[in-house]
């Protein structure tokens, strides 16, 4: 479930771009891990629908069950509205105890707390790219 949630939420990063073609999300080796279509449909690397993103920040799985909420102030919550962490305007990502998890650079590079590149979301708003940290497999 956590891997599926990660794929869904990482894919959601480009939902607000609303381009004609699907946007791809890649890992640190630039291997595509997911796509997001202009209608908010989220697909895995094999083009199977795994979820949806809505304008209000609600994220659902392929069965339309809510799995998370992304608030306009940068707060990330699970389906029970428990706070998972925070996304600051400078790209710093913190857990619910305000410990730094990592960073999202302005060019879309996603880095861990040691500044190692762990993903790419070029052209994706920082706030959305930061979701990577809340749903990555441990």
Image (cartoon, rainbow, N blue to C red):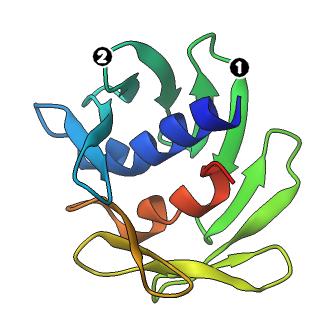
The single residue placed furthest to the left in the displayed view is 20
Quarter-of-image position of residue 36:
top left
Tell me what residue is drawn at x 42 percent, y 79 percent. 116
**Residue topped by disc 1:** 65
Residue 63 x/y as whole percent: 63, 10
Mark number, residue 40 = none
The one of 78 and 103 positioned closer to us in this rendering:
103
Tell me what residue is drawn at x 76 percent, y 86 percent. 99
Is residue 70 at least partly visible in the picture? no
- Establish if 31 lies above or below 63: below
Q: How many C-alpha atoms fall within 10 Å of the one at disc 1: few (<14), some, or many (≥20)?
A: few
- For the N terminus, give its image quadrant: top right
Residue 83 x/y as whole percent: 83, 61
6 lies left or right of 49:
right
Is residue 112 at least partly visible in the picture? yes
Q: How many C-alpha atoms fall within 10 Å of the one at disc 2: few (<14), some, or many (≥20)?
A: few
- Judged from the image, the secondary structure of the residue bearing numbered disc 1 is loop
77 lies left or right of 114:
right
The one of 110 and 84 positioned closer to us in this rendering:
110
- Establish if 51 lies above or below 130: above
Mark number, residue 47 = 2
- Establish if 98 lies above or below 9: below
- Judged from the image, the secondary structure of the residue bearing numbered disc 2 is loop
Tell me what residue is drawn at x 45 percent, y 59 percent. 128
Quarter-of-image position of residue 88:
bottom right
Residue 13 x/y as whole percent: 40, 51
Residue 133 x/y as whole percent: 59, 62
Q: In the rendered structure, which disc, 1 or 2, sits on the residue that comes first in sequence?
A: 2
Tell me what residue is drawn at x 32 percent, y 48 percent. 14
Mark 1–mark 2 distance (CA, rounded to whole Å): 20 Å
Quarter-of-image position of residue 15:
top left
């Amino acid at each position: 479930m956590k891997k599926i949630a990660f794929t869904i939420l990482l894919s959601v990063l480009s939902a607000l771009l609303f381009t004609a073609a699907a946007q791809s999300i890649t890992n640190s080796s630039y291997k595509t891990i997911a796509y997001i279509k202009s209608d908010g449909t989220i697909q895995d690397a094999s083009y199977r629908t795994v979820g949806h993103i809505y304008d209000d920040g609600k994220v659902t799985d392929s069965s339309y069950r809510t799995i998370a909420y992304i608030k306009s102030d940068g707060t990330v919550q699970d389906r029970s509205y428990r706070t998972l962490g925070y996304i600051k305007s400078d790209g710093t990502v913190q857990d619910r105890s305000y410990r730094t998890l990592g960073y999202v650079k302005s060019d879309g590079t996603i880095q861990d707390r040691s500044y190692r590149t762990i993903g790419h979301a070029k052209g994706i708003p920082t706030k959305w790219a930061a979701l990577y940290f809340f749903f990555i497999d441990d």
